[in-house]
Every structure is written in structure tokens, then in C-alpha cells.
């Protein structure tokens, strides 16, 4: 939720307000040295009804960070020397907008702010740019979606409201003619609290929904109890923290409340500060205190760190996960000793576990996986057992009788004289390994699974058959061992005869040379000479018995291996073009998946264009040839193959150069085949941030995504720099943002690679080629040229249409894609006069 930026001084078609702002910014260093960029912000702190605001254009301000572009529509604004606020809309990529209250800190040089949303009317859900906020004549504050339907309102009709005000504390207030408060945001917190705000019974902080899961965390105050933190699902609510000191709460006739002061919040002591601060309940259940550091970022501290163990959060290890407290922090694992569970993502164990066999509510075959030495987070609260003084078997039967409303049972406190306590749980929260923690009680977890036997087994029958099953099991085990041994001998002989394992029927479709793994191991010197590393594996130098050098790509990872291997081998193995790296063969033995390519001695393009060393300088004619070769390779993939092939990951790292600097496309691990009569294809987002076309937002793509990526690479070759380079000054980090500004100022010659003297000599020619790049970067993919048209332009057979282009500055962060729309005319792209 934290995002920051400097006020953009270079935007297209600015409004009159922005023009005034730009003039002020130019005069500031001379006329008003104490005035700052942020102080040029302005907006009303109070408005009278009726009034209306639309999320989209025209925007009041554009904020930009090194990797982020945000447009802002101000409703209310309040600036102080400490925390400052604005109440309004922020929009990403114009179609993704949020409405709420944002806090930021004005710092000494006033060139940067980091606004954070601390209150949201609809709890941070995105809207489209046509969303509206209305302060109606009846005195109701209403948020409407782009379809005109009500999303949220204050429900204050006919309560005599006359205006809306934003206080210095960040409280949004509806007031009447006598200035009495009718409604205030302080009474309706979302996931944050601000200094001066009190948390009282009936009010609660509610976390954002994490990862789309149907659970939320809440933090509230209860009478005579104090703070209570809970996790809530559709079927239950369980407490994971209660306050340790109610005495520090303010009291009013038996009712407790927690005031967020400058040095405390209930039982929590806070550092004194005049800087912006807030408290946030986050999507992992942690309550964190944020304080601005006075420079460019926020410091945060977990308020519950001394009260809750790292393993004490309900979803710290996901569903069915078991958390162990170690010296390096919480470690997550599945109850693997049962054989019933596996990790959802092997590289991210905190995401939890899946049952290896799905459990049907009406299945008669349920049984239990038993895990000993378990502690449960809710034991820290005073929770009552569902059945007391009972046995393990009765506890199991009770869980079975509840169907899907019981996913696991916890059993503890059984002694020689009394039965134990049974807890029936409807949700599969994380468990704690209590082996080294020493929590009390120490429980037995009984996780419901499906035994898939096809027959219901009662507890009495299970006990009666135990001895018989041991005898039968031993006999069956001996027989199975014999059969397995015979099978292994057969398989070993078959592998020896064939020298490979045909373990995947899809491999039969690959009409390529098949190399034995041991041969490739010898050819590469046991994989000792690494040439590079990519998203799906490493590449090693090898030599064939004939003396020809090869590049061997060894695929690593788990779930992606088969898909990437078949995509790359199946695609490039059936096509041949001078501007595509040639695939010589493959290896598929057991878990080994390797691809054997021709060796490209000059490596990848990025090492030749992203440099400041004359040793790696490549001349204008070579760069022009490389651009032409890339275009020809893509034109072949898109238009000349039996099926249209989209590469989907065009970037300098995937463009290789031979001894004569001929360029060839490589790394087809993300490629997609579509029929030629298919104009578009639905697919999940893939590729590399910075090279992704805007239409990835809609998940409907065409081969024009490659055209967009080509445009980015083309500019990088001409400019001799990365699309996003954070080592540069803030106003030069984004190549496309700088490109836009230089075009507006008719100074595109400044963009040509300044570290290459030969490029500087051919600057005017390079500037003309930038026009082709802009043609490829248009937002509307239907307006981008085909790659065959690009080839013709590069060869001088046709010219670029003299029209204006609109393209975006893309950025991918998590699940967001934001951009700044840029309008460039053919005249602006013609270069300096």
C-alpha cells in the first residue's frame, strides 16, 4: 500500500492548474528558494454541498516514482509541518482507481512524498476511472461505480449537513450549520488508525483480504476485556490475541476505549514524534506501527512482537501447515509423516498444504492423520472444549459426524484417571510444532483425510481388525517387494538398451537428436563452465566430439520444467531461420531436461548495449543490423510459420550474437502457438516487467505484444541504456518518460547513446529510427505495425505513417500494472531542428 513519488514536471496536454504549477517549479530555485515542490500542492480543506468529483481526467496532479506513475484527483487537502493528507482518487493506468484518505510527510527538500492510504470507503477495492463521489443536496456523501450504482455512502440524508471538511488530524467530517459533527471517518476505521483517533467497543480494524482467501483479521476493543484480535472465516471466528493490560485503557462508566496518542495506544508504548505516523492491521494479522523517517520512507514496528510468537498467527504457514520456531525465524512444513499432504508451492512453504486426495463431505471413507506434540494458536484464549472428559476415539467419531463442518480435531489432557478434552475445528488453520516450544497444553492433532478404501471403517471394527491387518500387511508387503524388485530389474534393462527413458509421451513428437545425459555431462565437463542463467535454468558451454562448441541449457525448478521444456523444444525444434538460434537436440532422462543449442560466441545483446566501456562499444551499422535481424526473426515467427508463434519474452537477454554480430532470437520457454486464423488468445500474464505491453491487463493478447517488446528493445539499442535504470537521476530512470520529455523539447538527439562516439556521429539517423520504435509502442495494439511492415521500414522500402502515437510507460509490481499515457506526434519525433 506504500507508494511514493515526486511531482512530475513533464506531462502531456497539462491542465491550466498544472501549467501554473510547472511555471512555479521553474521559478522556485531563483525567486522562492524556501518554497518547495510539495508546497505548490493545493486543494480545499472544506467544501459545501452539492459537489461532485469523477475519478478520471482531468487530474489535479501526476506523481511519479522511479518505477511508478500515479494520477491524483483531489477532493480535500490538508497540509501541516507534520503529517499532511489528501482525500480523493488515485488512478493507475487510468482504468484502475482507488478512493480514500492518504497520509504523507513533507520533508526538508520537499521533492518527494510517500502517500499511504489510511482510510478507504470501500476497503481498498479498485474501481474504474468513471467512478464518482457525490456530496448531494440532501447531505449524503455517496461513492458511485462506473455503472452508476452506489458502492458506499454515509447515509446522512436529511440530517442538515452543509459541508465536508478534512481536519488537521486527518478526520473527514460532515458538519451542519452550527458546525456540529454529523458523520466522521474517525468513527468508521478501515484497516488503519491515526493519532487522535480512539478505538471503542463496536469499532474495529479490518484487514484487507489476503491472497483472495475467504478470511479476514479484526482488531477491536471489548468492554471489561480490552484489545481482541481475531481471525474470521465464513464458518468460524477465533481469537489469537487478548490484551495483557486493560488498566491502560480509558474508561467511561465501565466502557473501555483505546486512544491513539503521541506516546501510547492502550497497552502499547509508542515513540514520541512529530512526523507522520499510523497504525495498520495488515493482511497477515500483524498490527504494525508506521512512522515516517523524515527522508524518503517509512519505518515500521510490529506492536505484537513481544506478545505473540512468530508461529502464533492463524495462517503463518497456511492451511494444514505446521510452524516451527527456529533461530532464523518461523519455518513451515506439511504433516509429511502422514503421507496425506503436500505443499501447495514447494518454494513458498508458507502458502500451506493440500491434501493429496480431496475430501468429499458425504464420503464414508474418512479417517484421521494423527500429529503429536501440537499447539494451537487459539489455546492462548479461553476457549471451551466441545467435549470434555472423553477419549480419542469418541473425539474422532464426533468430528466424523459433523461432515465438512469439522476439518480436524484437537485432543489433549488425557490422564490415567480422566479422559481428555476434544476441540472440533471447522477451519484448517496453521498448527505449531510444540516439541521445543514448551506451550501448554500439548495436543494431538487429528486431521480428517480420505482413506480411499471404498468402505467405511468404524472405530470398534478398526481395533478388532488391527492384529489381522498387521499379518495381512506383512504378507502383502513381502509380495509387493518381490514385484517391485522384478519391475526395477526390467526397467533397468530397458533403460540400458534404449539409453533413455521414454517417460513422457509428448517427447515422441520431438523430431530432434536425443542426447544421453552422461554424454552431455562429459561434453560440458560436468557442467562447470556456466555461460549464463535464466528464468528456467542455467546454460553451460560444451563441445561435441567433432569439436563444434555447443550451449547446453539445463532446466531447473519444479512445476515449470515440463511446460517450459515442451514449449521450447516443441517450438524451435520444428522451425529454422537464420535469425533464430538453432536447436541441435535434447535430453530427457529421469528428472533431467536439457536442450542443446548452437553456441553464440558473442553472448547476449545486453552485455553490448548496457555498458559504459569502449571495449564493448558496437558501431551504428552493427546496431542497425541487429535491429533488422530481430525484426526479421519475429516476422518469421508471426507470419511465415505453419502456426503463428508468439515469443512473449523479447528482451536483450534473449537475443544472442554470433561471431559476426548476427542477431538470433533465443529462449522460447514462454512461447505460445496459435492458429493463423486466430486473431487473439487468452493467456496468463508472462514475460519480463518493463517489456510487457499494456494489453496484458485484459489477458487477451496477440502477436502485437512481441511488437511492443521489440519497440522497447529497439530504443534500448539506440539509447545504449536500460528501459528502467535506477542508477540514473530520478527524472531519467524511465527511458520512455525521458523519451517523451525529449520529444516534446525536440531534443531527441540527447537520447542517442552518449558513450558511443560512432553513435553520436550517426545521431540524426538514430533519431529517425526512434520514430519506428514509437510506432511499435502504441497502446492500441491494432495500431501497431506487423513485424513484416517494420522490416520494410528498416530496409527503406516504406515510410512510417505521419500520425501521432499514444504509448504507455509500463510497470509490473505484484498484480498491478500502471502507466503514463504519452502522446507523441510525428513532428516531435523528427528530431532537433
Image (cartoon, grey):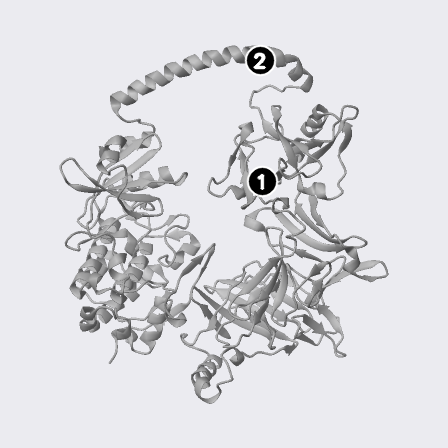
Residue named by callout 2: 470
On screen, residue 106 above or below 539: below
Residue 511 lies in quadrant: top left
> Would you call the spot at circle 1 few (<14 residues within 10 Å), some (14-19), or many (20 or more)?
many
- Horizontal placement of 642 versus 150: left or right? left
In percent of width and height, residue 254 lies at 85, 58
* Residue ID at (62%, 66%): 277
Q: Earlier in the sequence, mark 1 or mark 2?
A: 1
Dot 1 and dot 2 residues touching (CB under 8 Å)? no
Residue 407 appears anywhere in the view: no
Q: Nearer the viewer, residue 114 or 148?
A: 114
- Horizontal placement of 582 versus 87: left or right? left
In percent of width and height, residue 737 lies at 37, 69
Quarter of the image with the C terminus is bottom left
Quarter of the image with the N terminus is bottom right
Residue 723 lies in quadrant: bottom left
Q: Nearer the viewer, residue 665 or 570?
A: 665
Amino acid at each position: 500500500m506504500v507508494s511514493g513519488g515526486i511531482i512530475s514536471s513533464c506531462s502531456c496536454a497539462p491542465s491550466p492548474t498544472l501549467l501554473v504549477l510547472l511555471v512555479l517549479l521553474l521559478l522556485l530555485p531563483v525567486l522562492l528558494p524556501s518554497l518547495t515542490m510539495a508546497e505548490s500542492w493545493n486543494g480545499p480543506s472544506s467544501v459545501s454541498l452539492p459537489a461532485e468529483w469523477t475519478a478520471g481526467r482531468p487530474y489535479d496532479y501526476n506523481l511519479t516514482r522511479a518505477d511508478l506513475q500515479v494520477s491524483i484527483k483531489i477532493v480535500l487537502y490538508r497540509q501541516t509541518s507534520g503529517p499532511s493528507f489528501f482525500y480523493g482518487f488515485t488512478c493507475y493506468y487510468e482504468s484502475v482507481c482507488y478512493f480514500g484518505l492518504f497520509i504523507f510527510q513533507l520533508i526538508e527538500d520537499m521533492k518527494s512524498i510517500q502517500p499511504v492510504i489510511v482510510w478507504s470507503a470501500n476497503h481498498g477495492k479498485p474501481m474504474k476511472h468513471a467512478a464518482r463521489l457525490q456530496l448531494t443536496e440532501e447531505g449524503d456523501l455517496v461513492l458511485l461505480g462506473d455503472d452508476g450504482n452506489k458502492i458506499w455512502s454515509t447515509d446522512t440524508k436529511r440530517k442538515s449537513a452543509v459541508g465536508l471538511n478534512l481536519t488537521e488530524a486527518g478526520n473527514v467530517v460532515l458538519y451542519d450549520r452550527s458546525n456540529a459533527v454529523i458523520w466522521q471517518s474517525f468513527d468508521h476505521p478501515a484497516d488503519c488508525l491515526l493519532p487522535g483517533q480512539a478505538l471503542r467497543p463496536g469499532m474495529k480494524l479490518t484487514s484487507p483480504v489476503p491472497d483472495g482467501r475467504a478470511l479476514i483479521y479484526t482488531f477491536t476493543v471489548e468492554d471489561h476485556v480490552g484489545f481482541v484480535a481475531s481471525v474470521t472465516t465464513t464458518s468460524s471466528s477465533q481469537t489469537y490475541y487478548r490484551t495483557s493490560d486493560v488498566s491502560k485503557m480509558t474508561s467511561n462508566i465501565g466502557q473501555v476505549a483505546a486512544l491513539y496518542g503521541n506516546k501510547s495506544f492502550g497497552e502499547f508504548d509508542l515513540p514520541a514524534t512529530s512526523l507522520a505516523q499510523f497504525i495498520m492491521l495488515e493482511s497477515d494479522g500483524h498490527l504494525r506501527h508506521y512512522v515516517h523517517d523524515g527522508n524518503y520512507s517509512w519505518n515500521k514496528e510490529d506492536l505484537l512482537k513481544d506478545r505473540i510468537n512468530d508461529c502464533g498467527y492463524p495462517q503463518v504457514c497456511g492451511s494444514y501447515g505446521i510452524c516451527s520456531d527456529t533461530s532464523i525465524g518461523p519455518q513451515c512444513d506439511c504433516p509429511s509423516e502422514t503421507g496425506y499432504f503436500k505443499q501447495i508451492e514447494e518454494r513458498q512453504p508458507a502458502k500451506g498444504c493440500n491434501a493429496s486426495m480431496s475430501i468429499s463431505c458425504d464420503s464414508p471413507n474418512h479417517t484421521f492423520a494423527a500429529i503429536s506434540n501440537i499447539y494451537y494458536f487459539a489455546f492462548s484464549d479461553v476457549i471451551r472444549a466441545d467435549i470434555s472428559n472423553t477419549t480419542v476415539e469418541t473425539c474422532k467419531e464426533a468430528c466424523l459426524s459433523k461432515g465438512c463442518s469439522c476439518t480436524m480435531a484437537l485432543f489433549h489432557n488425557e490422564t490415567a484417571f480422566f479422559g481428555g478434552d476434544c476441540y472440533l475445528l471447522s477451519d484448517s488453520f496453521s498448527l505449531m510444532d510444540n516439541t521445543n516450544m514448551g506451550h501448554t497444553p500439548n495436543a494431538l492433532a487429528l486431521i480428517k483425510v480420505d482413506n480411499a478404501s471404498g468402505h467405511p471403517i468404524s472405530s470398534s471394527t478398526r481395533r478388532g481388525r488391527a492384529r489381522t491387518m498387521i499379518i495381512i500387511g506383512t504378507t502383502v508387503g513381502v509380495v509387493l517387494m518381490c514385484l517391485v524388485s522384478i519391475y526395477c530389474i526390467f526397467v533397468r534393462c530397458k533403460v540400458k538398451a534404449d539409453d533413455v527413458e521414454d517417460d513422457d509421451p509428448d517427447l515422441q513428437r520431438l523430431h530432434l537428436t536425443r542426447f544421453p545425459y552422461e554424454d552431455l555431462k562429459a561434453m560440458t565437463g560436468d557442467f562447470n563452465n556456466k555461460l549464463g542463467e535464466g528464468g528456467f535454468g542455467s546454460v553451460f558451454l560444451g563441445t561435441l566430439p567433432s569439436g563444434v562448441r555447443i550451449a547446453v541449457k539445463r532446466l531447473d525448478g519444479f512445476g515449470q520444467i515440463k511446460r517450459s521444456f515442451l514449449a521450447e523444444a516443441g517450438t524451435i525444434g520444428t522451425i529454422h531461420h537464420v535469425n533464430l538460434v538453432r536447436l541441435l537436440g535434447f535430453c530427457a532422462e529421469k528428472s533431467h531436461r536439457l536442450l542443446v543449442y548452437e553456441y553464440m560466441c558473442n553472448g547476449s545483446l545486453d552485455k553490448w548495449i548496457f555498458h559504459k566501456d569502449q571495449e564493448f562499444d558496437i558501431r551504428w551499422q552493427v546496431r542497425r543490423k541487429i535491429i533488422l535481424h530481430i525484426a526479421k526473426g519475429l516476422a518469421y515467427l508471426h507470419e511465415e510459420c505453419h502456426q503463428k508463434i508468439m515469443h512473449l519474452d523479447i528482451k536483450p537477454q534473449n537475443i544472442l550474437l554470433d561471431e559476426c554480430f548476427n542477431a538470433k532470437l533465443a529462449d522460447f520457454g514462454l512461447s505460445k502457438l496459435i492458429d493463423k486464423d486466430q486473431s487473439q488468445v487468452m493467456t496468463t500474464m508472462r514475460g519480463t516487467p518493463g517489456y510487457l505491453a499494456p494489453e496484458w491487463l485484459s489477458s487477451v493478447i496477440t502477436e502485437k505484444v512481441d511488437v511492443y517488446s521489440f519497440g522497447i528493445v529497439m530504443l534500448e539499442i539506440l539509447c545504449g541504456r536500460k528501459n528502467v535504470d535506477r542508477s540514473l537521476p530520478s527524472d531519467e530512470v524511465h527511458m520512455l518518460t525521458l523519451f517523451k520529455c525529449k520529444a516534446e523539447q525536440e531534443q531527441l538527439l540527447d537520447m542517442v547513446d552518449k558513450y558511443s562516439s560512432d553513435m553520436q556521429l550517426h545521431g540524426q539517423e538514430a533519431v529517425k529510427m526512434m520514430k519506428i520504435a514509437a510506432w511499435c509502442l502504441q497502446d492500441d495494439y491494432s495500431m501497431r505495425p506487423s513485424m513484416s511492415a517494420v522490416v520494410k521500414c528498416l530496409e527503406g522500402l516504406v515510410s512510417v505513417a505521419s500520425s501521432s502515437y499514444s504509448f504507455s510507460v509500463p510497470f509490473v509490481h505484484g498484480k498491478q500494472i500502471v502507466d503514463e499515457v504519452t502522446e507523441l506526434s510525428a513532428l516531435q519525433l523528427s528530431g532537433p531542428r
